[in-house]
Structure formats: C-alpha cells, structure tokens
Image (cartoon, grey):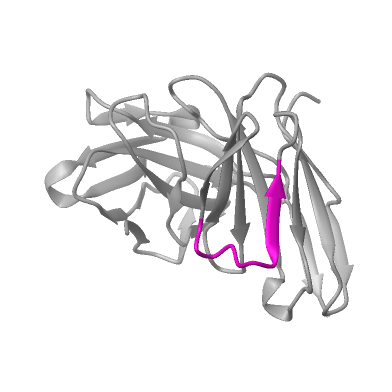
Amino acid sequence: DTGVSQDPRHKITKRGQNVTFRCDPISEHNRLYWYRQTLGQGPEFLTYFQNEAQLEKSRLLSDRFSAERPKGSFSTLEIQRTEQGDSAMYLCASSFGLADEQFFGPGTRLTVL
Amino acid sequence: AQSVSQHNHHVILSEAASLELGCNYSYGGTVNLFWYVQYPGQHLQLLLKYFSGDPLVKGIKGFEAEFIKSKFSFNLRKPSVQWSDTAEYFCAVKEGAGGTSYGKLTFGQGTILTVHP
C-alpha cells in the first residue's frame, strides 16, 4: 500500500494520560499535515511540516499538543494530559510539488474516557 | 480568517436524480478550491479541484463544480446520481494563487448524501 498510513487506527485512553500517534506519508512527499475532525464537522487544521520544519501551527494546538517530523519522513503527534474534549479523529495528509494536492490517511480515532 | 459554509447537512435523493451541493467561502483573496469525498469506511479522497482558468471543473465519477467568484461559491453538481455516490462530501478552500500555494485547507462542515436505489 503506497498511501498515507496512520498508527494506531483506534486509541482509547483515560483522561490525563499521554498519547502519541504516528503518520507515514506517501514516499517522497515533502509536506505533511495534521488535522482533527469531530463528529458532524469537517477536518480542522492543526499543523504542517515541510520536510523537517514545522511551518504553521493552529491556535487549536494548545501547549499539550506537540508534533515532530525529525527526519522529514514520518511524523508523530503527541497529546499530553488528555482531556475528554480531545476525543476526535486525527487525520494526516501528505503532499508534494506545486499543486500541493493533499492525500489523506485513514485517521486515528481517539476516545478519552 | 477564512471560513467555508456548506448549505445542506444531509441530502437524500433517489437514483438518477440530479445533485447540487452548495459551498460558499469567505475570503477576499485568491483561493484554490476543492471537493473531497468520504465513502463509508474509507478515508477522504479528492473529487475535484479548481486552481485557475475555466471556472467549470470536471472531476472523477461524473462530478463537476463551478466557481463563481462574484458569489464566493463553488457548488458541486452531478446530473444523475447513483447508489454508489452515497458518501459525505466536503468543500475545502486554500489561500493562494494559481496552482502554487502551499498550506492548510479550510473545510466546510460536510454534506451527507444518501442515494436510494
């Protein structure tokens, strides 16, 4: 499968725990995006990377959220001290080139109890 | 900040009916426009996109969309829907010029389309 992959697909955690999600973009895609989607809403932008550099962060991304893309390939999104309001689908997308068409992964569904 | 509004939350049609899903955005500058589709159990897929040029763009599976700049609209159309078109449809906007803009997509809240056989 040469698409964007995300791991895990589902995560259930208790409030206050830390969680980490991984995204593997399409090979050679230099841009990587994170979005969050809650029920009944469209995806909301969180942050994006071009190669290793984190170029933009949304105000939605509180201090409890951190994202990395250490070698310009896969990326991780960590949420510290999870809250029930963090329950959502976390989507990753990757792109390359001038057109920057974003290809989405299947998402990680987080449930915070 | 830009925003995207999709007029209908849920649309129910019979097969062979015509479809039009509304999308309006609020941003005064140059934009790139997209429609994404999410079939049940699958991830988001690009249906069509507009960067510049002909405001009527054609996508996959017989879908098309028309960009009307004066109305800040990018409505999705299909002359005859099929049961397999049952999915959720998202309109998205990216600030930029032509086909060389990078950065975040701003999505509408989505429209669920149910097509009855």
Q: Which residue is depicted at the point 46% across and 57% down?
A: B13
Residue A61, percent from left and from top: 59, 62
Q: Is residue A10 left or right of residue B105?
A: right
Q: Is residue B104 visible?
A: yes
Answer above or below: position of B3 versus A104. Answer: below
Nearest to the observer: residue A74 or residue B12 = A74
* Magenta residues, start to end: A58-68
**Left or right of residue A51: residue B23:** left
Quadrant of res A46: bottom right
Nearest the eye: B69 or A61:
A61
The verdict on residue B50 being magenta is: no
**Residue at figure coordinates x 73%, y 45% from the top left:** A106
**Magenta: predominant secondary structure element?**
loop
Residue farthest toward the left in the current orientation of the protein: B70
Q: Does A40 sit above or below residue A20?
A: below
State the residue at coordinates (32%, 59%).
B1
- x and y, in percent, of residue B9 in the image: 45, 66
The picture places residue B117, in percent across and down from the top left corner, at 58, 51
Q: Quadrant of residue B24?
A: bottom left
Q: Nearer the viewer, residue B45 or B2?
A: B2
Q: Nearer the viewer, residue B14 or B77?
A: B77
The answer to whether B76 appears left or right of A21 in the picture is left
Give the number of marks: 0
Left or right of residue B91, residue B83 in this image: right
Residue B34 image position (x, y, % from top left): 41, 39
Q: Is residue B81 something one can see in this rendering?
A: no
